[in-house]
Image: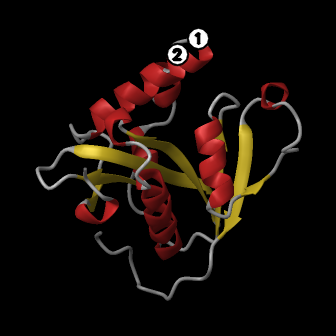
Amino acid sequence: MTSASELTITQVFVADPRVKPLLRELGDEYARRYGKDAHAELARYPDEEFTTPHGGVLLLLLDRGEAVAGGAFRRYDETTAELKRIWTHSAHRRRGLARRVVAELEREASARGYRRIYLTTGPRQPEARGLYLTTGYIPLFDTEADPETIGPLPFEKHLPAAPHRGKAADL
């Protein structure tokens, strides 16, 4: 069994071939949960929004280079990054990998000067909702309401100020 500490994190472009299988599985799962093709939604944002200096894509890799989890961020506004496409391959869940991806995305966003993270997750993704609640995200919705009546569930988290590094360092 692979632990989170045996994995390496790397920054890549959306077009990296290791990203495609994760996004395909993500789109397939969204389609099962929501009953509609989600691949178009995943392609809604131009790849350039996930590149330096305003965004990034991170992957967690096994020692042989296989991507098992990943996520991305993009500029939401001048001080806010938006997390997108956070995913753990189905064969590698329940090992804390999504938590590590979120922490790495937060660290990189902070290094780029963002002071706040914003994200949404779907009402039929209780695992994601739980992840964000347990990692310090503030729900911007009534947590007692039926998620299906809300639609996308928005969250935010304020980041501590990062020491100035000049430009984003390679991971």
Answer whether labels 2 and 1 touch (C-beta < 8 Å): yes
Q: What residue type is labelled 2?
A: Arg
Decide: is 164 above or below 28.
Answer: below
Q: In this view, does 64 lie to the left or right of 159?
A: left
Decide: is 161 above or below 85.
Answer: below
Q: Which amino acid does label 1 sit on?
A: Gly
The percent position of residue 8, horizontal first and vertical second, equals 25, 62
In the picture, which quadrant includes the C terminus?
Answer: bottom left
The percent position of residue 30, horizontal first and vertical second, equals 52, 23
**Residue depicted at 38% across the width and 77% down the height:** 167
**Label 1 crowd bin: few (<14), some (14–19), many (20+), radius 10 Å:** few
The answer to whether residue 55 is seen in the rendering is: no
State how the image is colored.
secondary structure
Q: Look at mark 2 in the image and give the residue it sits on.
A: 32
Please identify the quarter of the rendering in which residue 149 is found: top right
Total labels drawn? 2
148 or 46, which lies in front?
148
**Label 2 crowd bin: few (<14), some (14–19), many (20+), radius 10 Å:** few
**Residue depicted at 33% across the width and 60% down the height:** 4
The percent position of residue 118, horizontal first and vertical second, equals 66, 54
Q: In this view, does 73 lie to the left or right of 51?
A: right
Q: In this view, does 48 lie to the left or right of 10?
A: right
The percent position of residue 164, horizontal first and vertical second, equals 48, 87
Q: Is residue 144 left or right of residue 112?
A: right
Q: Look at mark 1 in the image and give the residue it sits on.
A: 35
Q: Residue 86 carries which label?
A: none
Q: What element carries label 1?
A: loop
**Residue depicted at 84% across the width and 44% down the height:** 143
